[in-house]
Image (tube, coloured by chain):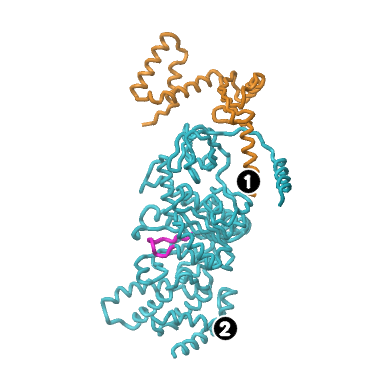
Amino acid sequence: MNKNHIVQNLRKEIENYSAALHVEKVGKVMEVFDGIAKVSGLSDIKSSEMVTFSSGATGVALNLEEDAVGVIILGDFSKIKEGDEVKATGKILEIPVSDSVLGRVVNAIGLPIDGKGAIKAGKTYPIEKVAPGVVTRQSVDQPVSTGIKAIDAIIPVGRGQRELIIGDRQTGKTALAIDTILNQKGQNMICVYVSIGQKDSKLRKLGALLEEGGAMDYTVIVSAGASEAAAMSYIAPYSGVSIAEYFMDQGKDVLIIYDDLSKHAVAYREISLLLCRPPGREAYPGDVFYLHSRLLERACRRNAKYGGGSITAFPIIETQAGDISAYIPTNVISITDGQIFLETDLFYKGIRPAVNVGSSVSRVGSSAQIKAMKKVAGTLKLDLAQFRELEAFSQFGSDLDDSTKRQLERGKRSVEILKQLQYAPVKTEHQVVTFYALTKGYMDDVAIDKIKEFEAGLLEYTEQNAKFFYKDVRETKMWTEQGEEQLKQAIVDFKASFRK
Amino acid sequence: MATRTVNDIAKAIHEMTKGKVGVELDAVSKNVVNFLARKRLLRKQKDILLRLEKITNEEEGIIEAGLTSASLLPEKEKKELATFLKKRYGREKVIFKEKIDERLIGGFKVEVNDEVVDVSIKNKIGKLQEYLTRAV
């Protein structure tokens, strides 16, 4: 590009530009502190309207008082001085959305932070939106395949569901979420991972993992890091769900993970206290329930008449020493359609993922489970519950009748089967075969320390020798008699060779 | 306890002093100052006076307009501006508070309460910069 060309372009651009004259509403900064600004003037401002500071930073008006406005500042607030001019924009805070956001890492206001250049902006979506109404919705009936055996079999999740992942620190909550994202490859799913108040090093690691697993092609990461202002953490999940809605509006299925909402609540508490809103229980403001309910209510499955598509939400909550009766955990448990409990004890017993299948539930997901899976895993939850009871009981006595012994042996093998390595999602049809072999008793005489080996071998063998079964499950979600016969034969054959 | 804002106090003072002249006004003023001193509100006197000015201006149909320009505006232009402002805000009189700011380069900027019309060259250049550097 030569000099003349640049000048020509510039001239053209300038000619196109017309400076429209209009009245602007302005205010003056009265005080700035901790990411909050008190602004005088701005008489006709709306709640959660976007404002711009003369330093270039943007803010959101949250508190509308008689003669001042409380504004949260998005971004750098160190350059804002007392007396600075603040302009109202007349718009509710919006973020740019487009298809090219896939594979990128953006911050809470939709700007790229992965150093891969600007994102071509398509549309803008407001970050606060009223959730889809009753008439536009449809009940959940399509499964989300997480690739985690314990979840897909016992706590199934459907598209459009809100399933809470809850547990102490270091119990594998994020790992569960990342595994789920990795397993969405080829499942016609867009993933949004919202990281709230996480360490940047952790995010970097996750990004690399997703990249390695080829998951970034269908994933967006929205990040409000620990070093950013609380205001960014506060709006990040709303930005994330706006991006999700952009894809849902195209009729796509979206999976969104909020990691984690405890930090989100803490950020909101910080903002609220700084804005002098009265504190309530655990010093959270009165509307902290609404904070999460309006966010999670935006997850939905829309019926075909209104364009289809769905948003499945996996909020994550971190508990302190397993205390699920704290304020935020109880709130979010009551909002969501079920929860996956992760426990430290199980984790250190070597049961990973450390899902407590007894207290985890999915309130709507069972109608989304495929028929084949329902058939093989239907009794698994009950069996495991009985096993736990018997296990505790059997520690006292040594004389057990045969049926109890059998139940104990089966239970031990079930627990073993549900263990799974990280970043190793299992395909649905493989899960069906494993649980088929387990519940029909084919594994009862395999030694417990050989179970994993047996499972791996079995899957490999049956995939070659029970093709009908696999084909049935893949295509019709249920097996035929012919396929079942073939599978039974294959299992028997494999067992014979495994013994040797 | 309900909070007493500066606005409330200014309103109350305005109500009390309305229509009073001479000795009566003096007495009322003295009471007001005593009250403010007793309630430790004298440190807010600047804000209260500003509010009071606004209230009386409103009552008397006066608007105050901040007028910042790069160079002194000719009387004719100011008159035109005054008629425009009177019509827009439905008031009878306009008081200009003029300021010269060479940083505006050219044109002027009018401020009424929290509304601003900025037709200065500085603003226009700023907007052009925003337009040219926008993300496409």
The picture places residue A301, in percent across and down from the top left corner, at 56, 59
From the image, state the color of chain B: orange
Q: What residue type is labelled 1?
A: Arg
- Taking the spot 63% from the left edge, 45% from the top edge, the residue there is B133
Where residue A288 sits in the image (x, y, percent)?
43, 48
Judged left or right of residue A255, residue A2 is right
Vertical relation: B130 (above or below) A458: above
Measured along the vertical axis of the image, is residue A90 above or below residue A401?
Answer: above
Query: Is residue A171 inside the magenta stretch?
Result: yes
Q: Which of A382 and A272 is in front in this view?
A: A272
Query: Residue at position x 50%, y 45% from top?
Result: A74
Q: Position of residue B55 (x, y in %)?
A: 50, 22
Q: In which quarter of the image is residue A484?
A: bottom right
Q: Tell me residue A153's x, y (percent).
A: 47, 71
A55 shown above or below A458: above
Q: Is mark 1 on a helix, strand or loop?
A: loop
Chain coloured cyan? A
Q: A404 and A325: which one is in front? A: A325
Q: Mark 1 points at which residue?
A: B134
Tell me the amino acid under the disc marked 2: Gln
List the single residue furthest toward the bottom.
Answer: A500
Q: Which of A373 and A147 is in front in this view?
A: A147
Within-10-Å neighbours for mark 2: few <14, some 14–19, many 20+: few
Residue receiving disc 2: A482
The foreground one among B79 and A298 is B79
Q: In which quarter of the image is the N terminus of chain B?
A: top left
Residue range highlighted in magenta = A162-173
Q: In this view, does A88 lie to the left or right of A318?
A: right
